[in-house]
Image (spheres, grey):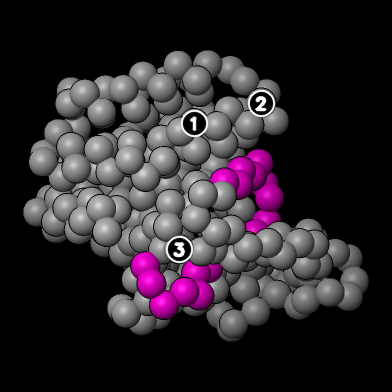
Amino acid sequence: MGGRQVQAARRLLAGTLDGELPEHERVLAARAVVAELGSPDRLLELTAELASGEGDPEGCARLSYRHVLGFDKLLLIDGGPHHMLRAHLWHPERGAVGKEDIHNHRSPLASYVVRGRLTMELYAPLRDGGIEADRYQESLSHQAADWLLEPTGPARLHLTQVAEYAAGSTYALPADTLHRAWSDTTEPTVTLFLETGSGRRRHTDVFTAAGPHPGAVPKVPLEVAEYLGELDALAELLRS
């Protein structure tokens, strides 16, 4: 199901990432794939095709939403347990853009900065010293798509690296790498984000120094028309 660009992207993702790979090889493969698919011309063609209704707009809309920190997560290709290809868009004019909580992921990831700029911090746990933070175990509700946050006690973290990624840059991280990223530009930032790996962790770890989190955070999916409209707007942004 899908047009020429959708089918080509699915073949590339499946041919490169399906099957059992050691995590370090999967991370490198994911980085190469997301750089290939994230080239502006190719991503524009893929996005325009999806905006026309190709692919699985109903299924992808159900897994696309506006993040509380001011960026949109638009699912482009759902590879089931093997891979999820998303476009992330930061809109500074919408407000609420800020630093994420420090966190890790359920599976290895790779990202390509299509336009704009991201700043990334990496962290490691410490026994003493460092940054004081509250630790949570994050999972997904079985009844709804809400994030569930269970407090697991205090923690201390050490900042190990700060990096800035301009348009054309890629990065890739193993699943358990603690990090946070944000965009501080006045223009929209677009990244192509790839989660991969069938052996996904059941939960992630979230660390915050900003005070207590609620026990559940709703994840509100986009309507199909809204999802297609956002894809069309993304295609126009990529043309500019």
As drawn, the residue found furthest toward the front would be: 240
Q: Looking at the picture, does residue 110 appear above or below residue 127? A: above
Q: Residue at x 88, y 75 (%)?
A: 129
Q: Nearer the viewer, residue 47 or 173?
A: 47
Mark number displayed over residue 148: none
Where does residue 21 sit, x and y in percent of width and height? 62, 20
Circle 1 residue: 33
Circle 2 residue: 25
Helix, strand or loop under label 1: helix
Q: Nearer the viewer, mark 2 or mark 3?
A: 3
Label located before the other in sequence (1 or 3): 1
Circle 3 residue: 116
Where does residue 200 sit, x and y in percent of width and height? 54, 36
> Is residue 71 left or right of 22 when viewed as pictured?
left
Helix, strand or loop under label 3: loop
Q: Nearer the viewer, mark 1 or mark 3?
A: 3
